[in-house]
């Protein structure tokens, strides 16, 4: 057994304890839950296994140096004194990523530049040459983490984030992250002992991740490489042995069902399922979720319904109302885990009371993972039985902290983002006494109830409870919300003006001027059509009869029908499909080059 050292597994907020439980099963030592990460100890084999086996880790980093510094110059001197020759030479490339939680260091990018200068100057003074900086695919990725005055230098063993599994061949709009999908499945208690259903599967991320968990297949075997393979102490034989070890895999006797209303989405799902090698346990179907025939009552439902950029608010509410009807009528005895958007009106449309809520950040949108326990009969009887079961379970006592296998790190300082929100609930301009968004008209008299002079004065609580790695990320998020709010206000104003103009035109009986009639814009008569009215192609009686050349060719007028996708336009040449999903010859032949043949047989 080799020398043991500290490692840190990074993850998304809310999945820290799930990741800690994975590390306990993996055999790690000294497991400690951090903010958006878990610290643990292990040897080189444990580091390789963590990259191959962990489902809820984004990356695995190895701390190599820790010191205290009061300013950037101190950081430069101490980084320069570190022995980088054990990790770098002039022929290699490196990149630096920095995360800052400190009042003394305000600019994380400037700190990254100082660390880069220190490394480069050390090699230049000793060898006359220097290693190069490369942002894409460097030989060594260096992470700089600052907590108050404590600076930690780490090297990244993963390279590309671990949610890039390697089995995905295509995706639909706004797919869920693989790490987040695996975390949701583990939070739901999924272990492969029953059926699983995703009625709106999209590109099939839940289906593939559920199959990998059920069969206990390592998610890292599909990746082409890890960054630790470029390190000087890389052990290729050890990685090959871990890669070929499938002794932990198990049989899966149930089925995983997925459906979607889009045929193209199911085609992409089938490609991803085939690429992952789990076609034997996944069944897909093209149909609306209302028409999906549920295979059994002993199943769990997990789904990420469309919302946000994929649907408008009204369409989202209707979709959730239909989903709630499906669950109430046909899913008795099941538990459903649904990702819901931040709009409370939309979540209330489902018409069910959640048994559990977990805050999640899904693709930059603050969402909730809600659990709905479906039952048959009266709700009072269900609640009474549930309370009795809870009382029986409570008599057994909670699991002592020492038996969990991990601990929680207590920080001596509060979360920087939470501290700023507490101390500065709203930014105010003392000179003009501007008020933030939401000021009433009788307070400031601003148009539409908001002070026009406070548009750049976004309050701190507009962060929606998010925490950010750097102050730049926080400022960028606030600016994004500000631009989005302005866009929505402008769109609402334009819609009101359009409705008002249409109503006035209808009341006055005004319409389009007749052929040959004098108009203000043209200023003159023209026989056979309009002149200077902004429409092209209306210069003949035949065009006037068919409302334009487009309608003459196709029988429909896109000017009257509004915008439609190119594929739906009658008479237009259809856009060729990216893949021919009717045959499987186009699919890439995945070569598991690491896996060696056993007993004279192939993979």
Image (spheres, helix red, strand yellow):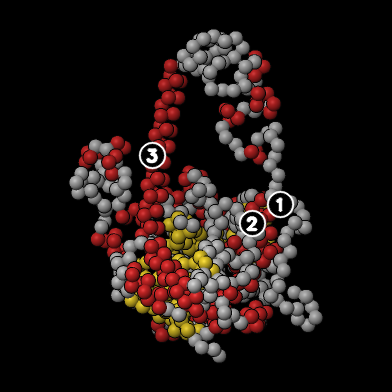
User: 572 and 78: which one is in front?
Assistant: 78
Is residue 503 shown to the viewer in this render?
yes
Point out residue 360 in the picture as x, y percentages from the top left corner: 45, 62
Residue at mark 2 = 170
On residue 489, the disc is: 3
Helix, strand or loop under label 2: loop
Q: Residues within 10 Å of mark 1 (few under 14, many from 20)?
A: few
**Of tags 1 and 3, which is closer to the observer?**
1
Q: Left of 350 or right of it: where is 539?
A: right
- The furthest residue to the front: 128
User: 438 and 519: which one is in front?
Assistant: 519
Q: Does the CB distance between marks 1 and 2 fall below 8 Å?
A: yes
- The quarter of the picture where residue 181 lies is bottom right
Q: Left of 492 or right of it: where is 586?
A: right
Q: Residues within 10 Å of mark 3 (few under 14, many from 20)?
A: few
Q: Residues within 10 Å of mark 2 (few under 14, many from 20)?
A: few
Q: Is residue 342 above or below residue 334?
A: above
Q: Is residue 400 above or below residue 115?
A: below
Point out residue 119 in the picture as x, y percentages from the top left corner: 45, 72
Residue occupying the point 65% across, 23% down:
549
* Mark 1 vs mark 2, CA separation in Å: 10 Å
Which label's residue is closer to the chain start, 3 or 2?
A: 2
Point out residue 566 in the picture as x, y percentages from the top left corner: 64, 38
Residue at mark 1 = 579
């Amino acid at each position: 057994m080799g020398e043991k050292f500290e490692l840190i597994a990074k993850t998304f907020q809310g999945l820290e304890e799930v990741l800690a439980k994975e590390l306990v099963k993996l055999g790690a030592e000294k497991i400690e839950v951090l903010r958006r990460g878990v610290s643990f100890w292990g040897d080189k084999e444990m580091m390789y296994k963590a990259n191959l086996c962990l489902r809820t880790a984004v990356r695995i980093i190895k701390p190599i140096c820790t010191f205290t510094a009061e300013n950037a110059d101190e950081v430069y001197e101490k980084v320069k004194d570190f022995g980088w020759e054990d990790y770098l030479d002039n022929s290699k490339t490196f990149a630096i990523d920095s995360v800052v939680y400190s009042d003394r260091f305000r600019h994380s990018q400037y700190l990254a530049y100082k660390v880069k200068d220190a490394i480069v100057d050390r090699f230049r003074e000793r060898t006359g040459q220097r290693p190069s900086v490369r942002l894409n695919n460097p030989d060594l990725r260096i992470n700089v983490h600052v907590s108050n005055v404590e600076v930690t230098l780490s090297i990244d063993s993963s390279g590309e984030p671990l949610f890039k599994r390697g089995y995905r061949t295509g995706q639909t709009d706004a797919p869920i992250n693989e790490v987040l999908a695996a975390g949701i499945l583990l939070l739901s208690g999924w272990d492969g002992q029953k059926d699983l259903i995703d009625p709106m599967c999209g590109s099939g991320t839940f289906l593939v991740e559920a199959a990998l968990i059920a069969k206990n297949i390592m998610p890292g075997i599909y990746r082409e490489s890890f960054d630790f393979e470029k390190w000087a102490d890389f052990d290729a034989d050890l990685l090959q042995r871990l890669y070929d070890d499938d002794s932990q895999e198990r049989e899966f006797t149930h089925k995983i069902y997925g459906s979607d209303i889009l045929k193209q989405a199911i085609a992409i799902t089938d490609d991803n399922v085939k690429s992952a090698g789990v076609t034997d346990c996944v069944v897909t179907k093209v149909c609306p979720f209302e028409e999906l025939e549920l295979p059994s009552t002993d199943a769990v439902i997990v789904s990420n319904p469309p919302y946000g950029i994929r649907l408008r608010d009204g369409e989202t509410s209707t979709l959730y109302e239909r989903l709630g009807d499906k669950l109430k009528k046909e899913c008795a005895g099941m538990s459903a885990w649904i990702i819901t958007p931040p709009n409370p009106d939309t979540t209330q449309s489902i018409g069910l009371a959640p048994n559990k809520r977990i805050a999640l950040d899904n693709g930059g949108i603050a969402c909730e993972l809600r659990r709905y326990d479906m039952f048959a009969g009266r709700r009072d009887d269900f609640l009474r039985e549930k309370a009795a079961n809870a009382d029986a379970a409570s008599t057994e006592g909670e699991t002592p902290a020492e038996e969990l296998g991990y601990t929680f790190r207590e920080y001596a300082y509060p979360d920087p983002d939470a501290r700023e929100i507490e101390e500065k609930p709203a930014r105010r301009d003392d000179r003009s006494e501007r008020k933030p968004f939401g000021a009433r008209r009788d307070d400031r008299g601003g148009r539409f109830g908001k002070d026009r002079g406070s548009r750049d004065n976004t309050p701190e609580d507009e962060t929606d409870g998010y925490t950010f790695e750097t102050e730049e990320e926080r400022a960028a998020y606030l600016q994004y919300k500000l631009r989005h709010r302005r866009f929505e206000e402008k769109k609402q104003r334009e819609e009101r003006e359009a409705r008002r103009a249409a109503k006035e035109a209808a009341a006055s009986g005004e319409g389009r001027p007749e052929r040959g009639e004098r108009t203000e814009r043209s200023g003159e008569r023209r026989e056979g059509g309009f002149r200077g009215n902004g429409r092209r192609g209306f210069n003949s009686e035949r065009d006037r009869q068919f409302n334009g050349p487009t309608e003459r060719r196709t029988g429909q007028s896109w000017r009257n029908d509004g915008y439609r996708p190119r594929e739906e336009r009658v008479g237009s040449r259809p856009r060729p499909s990216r893949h021919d999903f009717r045959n499987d010859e186009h699919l890439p032949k995945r070569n598991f080059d690491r896996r060696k043949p056993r007993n004279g047989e192939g993979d």
